[in-house]
């Protein structure tokens, strides 16, 4: 935890304090920001307030009074619920506008960790509770130089693995290979490259490619054969603590040229992807703030104009960090209205898709931002792959 940086951010946002609260590990975001042990035995409520100025303070139960000893600040102990409420009132007396892991109307559910009853209690004390979403983005999504470098390590390795995977499918067409067997091939290649992944990857043909989270199994898997439409969604990070993910999706055809319909859908998805890339790049070049929903609108507008909006069923992209779906702004004005700013030194995917009953096309790239620049970090698919 960097106390001075947190306090500076609170002042920038004109907030009096940031209140952290936990019980039975209900707030992993707060644990990570504060540097607490995610496996510690937590059976009683604790509270930790960081003011915009001055010393932090802890409120802990007497039988777990050492739980926050790794953090700076004074300590108040309680046993009864009356002591708890009294301690909270005293601890928070100087502060009015207080950030918590809360989202009005659960609009940004990724940060909505605090329960409604706690918010009600604090409002009864006269406090204005505001969302910590922008603070969480700053302290969870912003990457270090080492983490950015680890993303590019994963990018170089995974781009090579994907290219070799397409060649492996070509070599094994005659002898036969299934979606599941190819998924296993990718998993083994990722392990050989000293990387790790979570589930997947998604290797799917024909109508299975319309299921954006499809996972083949040994029992339920299609054979890949000439004439098929193919989608591969693959993600990995270097097998070291604190590394950043790389996450991409490519599509192609096995043993044939694309139909007019497939070409039209691919070009639409490609143009939508490029529209989102362009609006983010322009905003950073002009040093203008941009929220996640705005990039989603740029991509979605292209697909809407093509008459395919009803087949674009998910957000345009997600934040990427040490978790594949990170704590920063998502490119989303469908599932949520994500008003969080896309911050410098963050990573995120751009992945619009169109999912028809017979096939689905998604084109996914990753971007990393700096203070005045946003760039795509890997290869960009410009046409359907031919196998």
Image: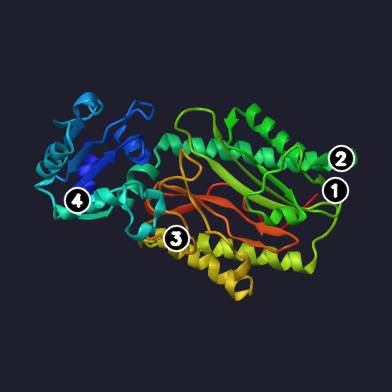
Q: Along the horizontal axis of the image, is 23 left or right of 184?
A: left
Residues under numbered marks 4 and 3 in contact, where contact means CB atoms less than 8 Å apart:
no
Reading the image, the residue beneath label 4 is: 122
The image quarter containing residue 175 is: top right
Residues under numbered marks 3 and 2 in contact, where contact means CB atoms less than 8 Å apart:
no
Mark pair 2, 4: CA separation:
63 Å
Tell which of 67 and 267 is nearer to you: 67
Q: Nearer the viewer, mark 2 or mark 4?
A: 4
The image shows residue 179 at horizontal and vertical percentages of: 76, 43
Tell which of 290 and 180 is nearer to you: 180
Reading the image, the residue beneath label 2 is: 176
Mark pair 4, 3: CA separation:
26 Å
Residues under numbered marks 2 and 1 in contact, where contact means CB atoms less than 8 Å apart:
yes
The image shows residue 251 at horizontal and vertical percentages of: 71, 53
Q: Residues within 10 Å of mark 1 (few under 14, many from 20)?
A: many
Reading the image, the residue beneath label 3 is: 336
Disc 4, SS: helix
Disc 3, SS: loop
Q: Residues within 10 Å of mark 3 (few under 14, many from 20)?
A: some
> What label does residue 115 carry, if any?
none
Residue pictured at 79% horizontal, 61% vertical = 258
């Amino acid at each position: 935890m960097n106390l001075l940086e947190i306090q500076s951010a609170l002042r920038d946002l004109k907030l009096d304090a940031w209140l952290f609260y936990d019980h039975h590990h209900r707030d992993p975001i707060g644990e990570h920001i504060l540097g607490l042990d995610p496996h510690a035995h937590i059976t009683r409520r604790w509270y930790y307030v960081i003011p915009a100025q001055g010393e932090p303070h802890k409120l802990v139960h007497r039988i777990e009074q050492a739980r926050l000893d790794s953090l700076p600040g004074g300590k108040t102990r309680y046993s009864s619920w009356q002591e708890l409420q009294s301690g909270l009132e005293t601890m928070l007396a100087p502060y009015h506008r207080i950030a918590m892991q809360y989202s009005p109307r659960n609009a940004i559910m990724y940060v909505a960790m605090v329960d409604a009853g706690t918010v009600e209690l604090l409002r009864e004390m006269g406090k204005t509770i505001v969302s910590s979403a922008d603070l969480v983005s700053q302290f969870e999504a912003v990457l270090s130089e080492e983490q950015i470098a680890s993303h590019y390590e994963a990018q170089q390795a995974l781009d090579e693995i994907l290219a070799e995977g397409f060649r492996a499918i070509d070599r094994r067409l005659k002898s036969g290979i299934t979606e599941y067997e190819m998924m296993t091939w990718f998993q083994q290649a990722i392990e050989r490259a000293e990387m790790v992944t979570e589930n997947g990857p998604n290797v799917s043909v024909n109508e299975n490619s319309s299921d954006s989270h499809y996972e083949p199994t040994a029992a339920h898997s299609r054979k890949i054969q000439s004439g098929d439409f193919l989608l591969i969604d693959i993600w990995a990070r270097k097998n070291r603590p604190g590394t950043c993910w790389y996450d991409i999706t490519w599509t192609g055809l096995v043993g044939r040229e694309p139909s007019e319909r497939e070409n039209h859908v691919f070009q639409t998805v490609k143009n939508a992807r490029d529209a989102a890339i362009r609006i983010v790049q322009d905003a950073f070049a002009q040093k203008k703030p941009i929220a996640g929903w705005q990039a989603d609108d740029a991509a979605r507008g292209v697909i809407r104009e093509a008459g395919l909006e009803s087949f674009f069923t998910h957000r345009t992209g997600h934040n990427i960090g040490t978790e594949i779906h990170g704590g920063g702004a998502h490119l989303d004005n469908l599932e949520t209205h994500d008003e969080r700013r896309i911050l410098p030194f963050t990573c995120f995917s751009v992945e619009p898709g169109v999912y028809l009953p017979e096939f689905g096309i998604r084109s996914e790239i990753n971007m990393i931002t700096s203070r005045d620049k946003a760039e795509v970090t890997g290869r960009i698919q410009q046409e359907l792959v031919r196998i």
